[in-house]
Image (cartoon, rainbow, N blue to C red):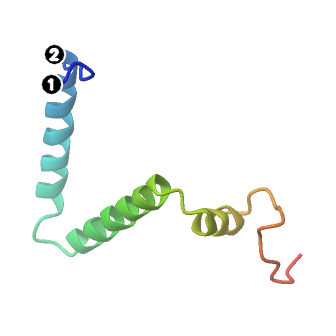
Amino acid sequence: MFSFLSFGINDVIDILLVAVILYLAYNLVKGTSAINIFIGLTFIYFTFMVLKAFDLKLFHTWQICERGGHRHHDCVSTGDS
């Protein structure tokens, strides 16, 4: 039924290690003002992942232009050249 899924011991170890690291990071910032920063950064990261998954070109172009990447016809000139 799910022959396209291959799940081995390496996958289990990987999932457990990531879960432990996330749990320890959460416990480190729980109860402090850093939890708000942690949640905010996590939200921004997942937002970028969703935008990348849906291949939103306009936002991606803005992101490249803001980073000072290669300029191309999609970048809006601010006159600061």
The local secondary structure at tag 2 comes to: helix
Q: Position of residue 72 (x, y in %)?
A: 83, 61
Q: Which residue is mark 1?
A: 12
Tell me if label 1 and label 2 are in contact, CB under 8 Å. yes
Say which mark, if any, is on residue 78. Answer: none
Q: Position of residue 73 (x, y in %)?
A: 84, 66
Pick whichever, 31 or 77, lies toward us: 77
Q: Residue at x 87, y 83 (%)?
A: 79
Q: In the drawing, does residue 62 fall left or right of residue 70? A: left
17 to 35, vertically: above or below: above
Quarter of image, res 1: top left
Q: Residue furthest right?
A: 81
Q: Residue at x 55, y 63 (%)?
A: 56
Quarter of image, res 13: top left
Q: Position of residue 28 (x, y in %)?
A: 15, 57
Q: Which residue is mark 2?
A: 9
Q: Residue at x 82, y 61 (%)?
A: 71
Residues packed near mark 1 inside 10 Å, few (<14), some (14 to 19) or many (20 plus): few
8 to 69, vertically: above or below: above
Q: Residue furthest top?
A: 9
Q: Residue furthest front?
A: 1
Q: Residue at x 80, y 83 (%)?
A: 78
Q: In the drawing, does residue 8 fall left or right of residue 37? A: left
Quarter of the image for the C terminus: give it. Answer: bottom right
Amino acid residing under circle 2: Ile
Amino acid residing under circle 1: Val
Quarter of image, res 58: bottom right
